[in-house]
Image (tube, helix red, strand yellow):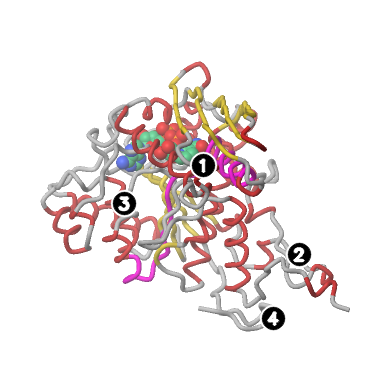
């Protein structure tokens, strides 16, 4: 779809009328921090810091036009007051108890909204220890086949929608990182995928069942973890058939976000890289799950791909051939959600002289992830109302391992991703693209 006026007033994106349901598989640190934050903002107790949909502006037209509305005033996004939350989790804790256990938010922020959070109770999850070994849950669905389980998820979505009189629903995966699964023939086509669900094939993980169920129900699916979930040819095919936007994988928060800021800077100045060593300590449940080598492998794959695609060693072998890239995650309970990351970057300058950059980042994982969940939910819903379907590459801004069309290398550079995101909004609203050429300001 495409708007065609220079003012955007004739855009054909459908308005965000009525209520939007946001479902999260996983009601842990990220999901509860997100939900608590939205409620707190709705009550005027907090500010939506870190969220583009709430705080960022977008320039329209020439610099001299001085038109830079807030994104949320430019594109029709669901209003925070119209959001309704639901979740699935194998652990039966309501959102208040889960948030207390996660230890991200302090009592001063949780107590005023305790009743609201207690009202969010997780639906029984599709869960198997084979895919997430460090969690033991009792709130789990039973079914003969994986297809039965996925049908139960579809039923949950319909019930959630009718119970809360929702107009639309979106889903953001906020559950644990599953063990590494290599894409295989079971994921190649929809037909093979559905047969594999029916014979309980191990290659079909719970996240894929959620993704299948959502797409079947016309619910956009955004994947915040590095496991495949919706990133298979079978489910991409289904999303295209059903006209559903999908995106992933793995929220781009702490160290990887920093990498996608620094690496483009090195490349822009043609400075070389000899090595990049990243390590961190983290003590939340996510850290515990990632302590299992099989789950860590999924995460590692996601974190490692970033530098190569940004630096393009095949184009710049003198600068980036064979740099060493090491990523470590260390589970260290005393730190809880307050991660500490260290990066040592060995760079190379003029005449081959070595230099070093050290980054010591004391971040809060869920505080960085929560606004990403909000933006992905609102933009995925917007994309659907704009008749966008399949992979939403413009949302790669939010991901460590962005999904891209087959044969296309994903874009990792944060600033290219940001331009792509804003230009997509301009395009959908019938505004001119901004090329930053700027010659018109100097024409005689
Ligand atoms: N916080 C960040 O900065 C960040 C960045 C990138 C990715 N992520 C990913 O986001 C996800 C959530 O992180 P978190 O810190 O909230 O973790 P968490 O452990 O606090 O919460 C995850 C929740 O998912 C539940 N769960 C596990 N399998 C499930 C299933 N099959 N269905 C439904 N629920 C299931 C667990 O019981 C748990 O409550 C993780 O996969 C993490 O790797 C987080």
Image point (15%, 47%), residue name: 201
In-front residue for pair 212/307? 307
| Residue 89 appears in the rendering | no
Give the labeled residue for mark 1. Answer: 320
In-front residue for pair 319/286? 319
Real-space Cα separation, disc 4 to disc 1, in angstroms: 43 Å
Label 4 close to label 1 by CB (< 8 Å) = no
Is label 4 in a helix, a strand or a loop?
Answer: loop
Label 2 close to label 4 by CB (< 8 Å) = no
Residue 250 included in the magenta stretch of the image: yes
Real-space Cα separation, disc 3 to disc 4, in angstroms: 40 Å
Give the labeled residue for mark 4. Answer: 6
Image point (58%, 61%), residue name: 421
Give the labeled residue for mark 2. Answer: 68
**Badge 2 local density, few (<14 within 10 Å), some, or many (20+)?**
some
Q: Closer to the N terminus: mark 3 or mark 2?
A: 2
Give the labeled residue for mark 3. Answer: 210
Query: Looking at mark 3, is its residue's CB closer than 8 Å to ligand 1?
Result: yes
Q: Nearer the viewer, mark 3 or mark 1?
A: 1
Is label 1 in a helix, a strand or a loop?
Answer: helix
Q: Is residue 153 toward the left or the right of residue 395 in the image?
A: left
Q: Quadrant of residue 233?
A: bottom left
Query: Looking at mark 1, is its residue's CB closer than 8 Å to ligand 1?
Result: no
Real-space Cα separation, disc 3 to disc 1, in angstroms: 40 Å
| Residue 77 appears in the rendering | yes
Q: Horizontal and vertical percent for residue 369?
A: 54, 41
Q: Horizontal and vertical percent for residue 194?
A: 18, 59
Residue 123 included in the magenta stretch of the image: no
**Badge 1 local density, few (<14 within 10 Å), some, or many (20+)?**
many
Q: Closer to the N terminus: mark 3 or mark 1?
A: 3
């Amino acid at each position: 779809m495409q708007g065609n006026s220079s003012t955007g007033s004739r855009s054909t994106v459908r308005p965000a009328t009525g209520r939007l349901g946001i479902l999260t598989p996983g009601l842990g640190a990220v999901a509860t921090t997100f939900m608590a934050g939205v409620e707190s903002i709705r009550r005027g107790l907090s500010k939506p810091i870190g969220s583009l949909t709430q705080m960022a502006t977008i320039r329209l037209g020439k610099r001299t036009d001085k038109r830079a509305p807030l994104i949320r005033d430019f594109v029709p996004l669901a209003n925070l007051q119209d959001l309704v939350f639901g979740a699935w989790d194998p652990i039966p804790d309501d959102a208040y108890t889960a948030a207390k256990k996660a230890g991200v938010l302090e009592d001063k922020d949780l107590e005023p909204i305790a009743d609201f959070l207690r009202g969010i109770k997780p639906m029984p999850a599709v869960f198997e220890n084979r895919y997430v070994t460090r969690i033991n849950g009792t709130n789990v669905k039973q079914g003969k086949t994986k297809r039965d389980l996925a049908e139960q998820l579809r039923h949950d979505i319909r019930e959630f929608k009718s119970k809360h009189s929702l107009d639309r629903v979106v889903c953001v995966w906020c559950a644990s990182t599953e063990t590494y699964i290599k894409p295989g023939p079971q994921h190649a086509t929809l037909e093979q995928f559905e047969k594999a669900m029916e014979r309980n094939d191990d290659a079909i993980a719970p996240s894929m069942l959620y993704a299948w169920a959502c797409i079947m129900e016309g619910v956009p699916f955004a994947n915040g973890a590095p496991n495949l979930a919706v990133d298979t040819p079978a489910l991409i095919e289904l999303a295209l058939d059903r006209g559903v936007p999908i995106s992933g994988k793995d929220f781009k928060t702490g160290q990887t976000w920093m990498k996608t800021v620094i690496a483009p800077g090195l490349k822009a100045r043609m400075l070389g890289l000899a090595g990049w060593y990243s390590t961190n300590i983290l003590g939340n449940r996510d850290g515990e799950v990632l302590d299992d080598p099989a789950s860590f492998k999924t995460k590692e794959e996601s974190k490692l791909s970033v530098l190569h695609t940004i630096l393009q060693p095949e184009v710049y072998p003198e600068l980036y051939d064979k740099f060493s890239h090491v990523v470590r995650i260390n589970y260290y309970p005393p730190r809880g959600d307050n991660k500490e990351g260290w990066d040592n970057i060995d760079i190379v300058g003029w005449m081959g002289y070595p230099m070093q950059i050290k980054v010591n980042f004391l971040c809060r994982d869920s505080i960085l992830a929560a606004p990403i969940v909000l933006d992905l939910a609102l933009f995925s819903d917007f994309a659907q109302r704009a008749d966008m379907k399949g992979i939403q590459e413009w949302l790669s801004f939010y991901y460590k391992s962005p999904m891209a069309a087959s044969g296309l290398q994903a874009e990792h550079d944060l600033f290219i991703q940001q331009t792509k995101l804003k230009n997509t909004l301009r395009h959908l609203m019938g505004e001119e693209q901004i090329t930053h050429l700027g010659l018109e300001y100097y024409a005689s």
